[in-house]
Every structure is written in structure tokens, then in C-alpha cells.
Image (cartoon, helix red, strand yellow):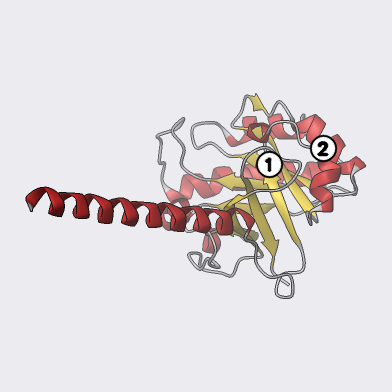
Amino acid sequence: MAHRDYKKTAIRFGLITLALLIIALVLRNIAVGWAPPRDQYPVQGISVSQSNGDIVWHIAGATGVDFAYITATRGADVRDANFAANMKGAREAGIRFGALHEYSLCKLASDQATLFVTTVPRAENILPPAVRLAFGDDCNEQPGRALVLSELNTFLNQIEAHSGKTAIIAVSPDFEELYDLGSGINRTLWLEGNFFPPDYATKPWVMWRASDMRRVSGVDGPVNWNVVRP
């Protein structure tokens, strides 16, 4: 009797495990293909870096990529290895693109700006530059808000003078919670939050990273999928 009960329990456990695996697979397939509805957000695109490998841009464009933000630089001394190739590929595919800088609290703003302006060409058809602010494993410093805002303004003024366009600030939830850039810097905000529109800044977002799981034909691995507020 005990052996029979054990077998029933094992079978029941196996069926539950199988059902959970199937549910997880279905949810994953939904997640990697999900994007906000086009009737609400007509303009949608991606942000990519060298971590996405060699991108086949004309294929990506055919799958609904309207624009792309391409990582150009990080901190004060790292140029993205695929920036030039990605910029060329996006241009040839007819996809509007802009350059993105990964900001570091451990480097001087002027040094970071110098790296950016010597990497990113100035051209009329390039989208406004973007700077992403988030805490990373490569920098543990958390200076005071006044210093961060001062340094960030220095960086923005220099890259905007180079590009001739007002920059976009992409800020993570924890970075915004600590420094409140929304009320301290008068720039367009690019916020993030999978599947649900974010509201963690003190002013509305203009761009939303709606998913970091989406798969796009022509691009290796998941990409950041972004939408523009109409």
C-alpha cells in the first residue's frame, strides 16, 4: 500500500512539474515576442551594443524596427567594438539611429565627453545623443547629488555642443530613486520597465524600454525594445 501511494505521489509530482515547465515555456515564448500595441505606440525600436553580435540590419528593419540606439562609448576609455559597423548597417538599412553613452560615476564628465565626441560623428540625420545612467559592478562610488548633477551637466553640455541636439537621459529605477534626475536635469527621460509603463520619475517619460527580452530577426540574443510616447 505504501509503495502504491508513493508511486501515485511521484506520478502526480511529475505531472505537476511537466505542467509548470509547459507553462514556463509558453510564457517565455509570449515574452520574447511581446511588444506594446502599435496603435498606441506607432514608433518602436531597439537599443543594441557589441553584446548583440553582428546585426543583419536590413532583416531587423523588416521586422518592425523603426529606429535604433547604438552604444558608442562607456565611461572615459571604452569604445564599443561594433559601433561603427552598427552605425553603417543601420544607415544602409534606412533605420534612423542615435548614439548612446554608458555613463560612469567613477570617471570625470569631461573625459567621458571627450571620448564620446571623438567617437560619434556629427551629422544631421543622427538622432539626439542618449546617455544611460545606472549602477554597475565596475563602479561602486555614489557621490552626492549636487556633484552628480554638476558633472552630468558638464557632460551633456559638451556632447550637445558637438551634436547640435538636446540629449536624452536613460535612467534606471534605482539611479533615479537616489538622484532624482527627473527634477534636477531638464532633459527628455527614457525610462525602463518590462511590460508595464514606468512611473518612477518625477516627470513623464518620452521613451520607454518596454522589454529587455524581445527577440528580433537579424539580431543575436534578446534586445532592449523601446517605444516613443505619441
Query: Percent position (x, y) of residue 172?
Result: 51, 52
In the image, is residue 112 above or below residue 135? above
Counting labels gives: 2
- Taking the image as drawn, is residue 144 in sight? yes
Q: At label 1, which amino acid type do we have?
A: Val
What residue occupies the far bottom of the structure in this picture? 39
| SS for dot 2 | helix
**Of pointers 1 and 2, the one earlier in the residue sequence:** 1
As drawn, the label of residue 48 is: 1
Query: Percent position (x, y) of residue 14?
Result: 31, 50
In the image, is residue 191 above or below residue 3? below
Closer to us: 61 or 11: 11
Q: At label 2, which amino acid type do we have?
A: Met
The residue pinned by badge 2 equals 87
Query: Percent position (x, y) of residue 5?
Result: 14, 54
Residue displayed at 48% across by 65% down: 200
